Each structure stands twice: as C-alpha cells, then as structure tokens.
Image (cartoon, rainbow, N blue to C red):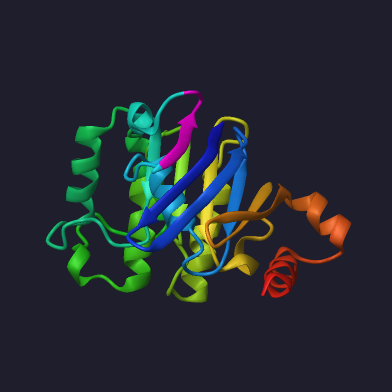
Amino acid sequence: MIEFKDVSKRFGHTVALDNFDITFAKGKITGLFGPNGSGKSTSMKMIAGLNRPDKGEVTLGGLQPQESKISIAYLPEIDYFYPWMTIKQAAGFLQAFYADWDEAKYKDLLGFLRLEEGMKIAKISKGQRAKAKLLLTVSRRAPYLLMDEPLSGIDVLTREEIINTLIRDYREGEQTIIFSTHEIAEIESLVDDVVFIEAGQVKLAGSAEDLRINKGMSLLEIMKEEFRNAN
C-alpha cells in the first residue's frame, strides 16, 4: 500500500499539499479526483520520488519512494520522450533501464492500440502520443502504476482505447493503480476506491461503490456537491 502521513508541500507561496493524510490500498485502482491545482500531480510526483515533502512522510510498502523507484511505472501528464525518437527507440530506452519490461506484452499492446514501431514521436498526432505513452508505461510489470491526467485534451475515441487498455491489462490484487484526473465520467466504472482532493487536502475518500450507494449519486455528482458546498 501507499501511505501519506501528514504530508505538506509548498512551492514558494503556493501550498500544494496541506497535511495530506491518506492510504491507497494495495491491489486496487484508486481514482484521485479534484479540480486543476488541487494537488493531484504533486502527490503523484511524491509517490514517484520526484518531489519530497516539506513535512510528513510518503511510503510504499514501508519503503521510501526513492527506494521503490524500480517498482513504479509513472505516466506524467507532459510528454517526456525525445521527439526524434521512434516508438521502437523509446521502448529500447526503457527496456535498458527496467528489468520488468515485458517485450511480449509490448508487442501485443502495440497491435491492440494500432501503433507502429517506426512512428516518430514528433510526427504523430496528440491522440497517438497519448496511446504511445500508455503503451510504454504499461509494458512494464511494475507493481505500482501511476497515471497523471492520461485523458487530458484527447478525443473521445482515444480515451475509450486508453480505458479499454487499462481494463484489459489490469492484474487485480497484484497491481496498485492510481489514476489522477478531473475527467471523472469516463473512468467512473473503472475505479475501486476514490480520493477527492481540494486545495491540497483530502475532501472525501472511500469505496466508489459505497459512496454511490450511500449518496445515491454518481462520483461526478458527488464531487460537484462536495466542492460546491465547500465554496
């Protein structure tokens, strides 16, 4: 499991996380939901070991993020591959660094997502880049998968392909996935647990199904209600 214990983080005068305290269950898909600027990306980067808390502690199975990097597959919102690379070159780059790279899985997903190894990153569409990022992230057998806004700014059909890939590839009980997004409607049926975050604090958290039943609303409606009441 992944634990945040009383974590705070500032960037200059901006408070990104404010006494953030939450546990992400092992072997489940958790949706990290909130508006832009709520602290979602900061928390994801902390799990990935790219940011350190000013106060508090983040652990993965009892280990510090810096000790667990080899176990984490992280898909950031921004493009992170060199534009001159082809998909094959980017795959080779990752394969050289991570022993959990699964070549058979990579080849299978390449066809499933209708991508070709010779495609150059700089010359493919935004939707194809989104699919390529997903391909290169989930082709590892990492026990922790972090996805930061993978649906942002792409068309509906590509979003559907990304979601279908995640459903197809998910190893229930083995892999812990955190899906950070403000696009809730598309992935509502995918998540087991949810964490609603606002202004760097946990607003509401729990089982997705329990929250829907108890409140008689969709997750999107719950978020709107919670944040509207806060404002």
Q: Main secondary structure of the magenta part?
A: strand
Image quarter for residue 11? bottom left
Quadrant of the snapshot with the N terminus:
top right
Residue at the far top in the pictured view = 62
Asked if one can make out residue 191 in the rendered structure from this viewpoint, the answer is: no
Relative horizontal placement of residue 111, taking residue 189 as reference (left or right): left
Please tell me whether residue 57 belongs to the stretch shown in magenta: yes
Above or below, comparing residue 220 to residue 7 in the picture: below
Please tell me whether residue 205 belongs to the stretch shown in magenta: no
Quadrant of the snapshot with the C terminus:
bottom right
State the image coordinates of residue 51 (x, y, percent, origin top left). Answer: 34, 45
Residue at the far front in the pictured view = 13
State the image coordinates of residue 80 (x, y, percent, origin top left). Answer: 25, 56
Comparing 57 with 12, the one in front is 12
State the image coordinates of residue 148 (x, y, percent, origin top left). Answer: 44, 56
Q: Residue at x 40, y 44 (%)?
A: 46
Number of callouts: 0
Image quarter for residue 67? top left
Q: Residue at x 76, y 66 (%)?
A: 218
Above or below, comparing residue 101 to residue 106 in the picture: above
Highlighted range, magenta: 55-62
State the image coordinates of residue 74 (x, y, percent, origin top left). Answer: 38, 46
Relative horizontal placement of residue 143, taking residue 10 as reference (left or right): right
Relative horizontal placement of residue 199, taking residue 129 as reference (left or right): right
Q: Residue at x 46, y 62 (%)?
A: 149
Image quarter for residue 101? top left
Asked if one can make out residue 82 in the rendered structure from this viewpoint, the answer is: yes
Q: Residue at x 55, y 67 (%)?
A: 182
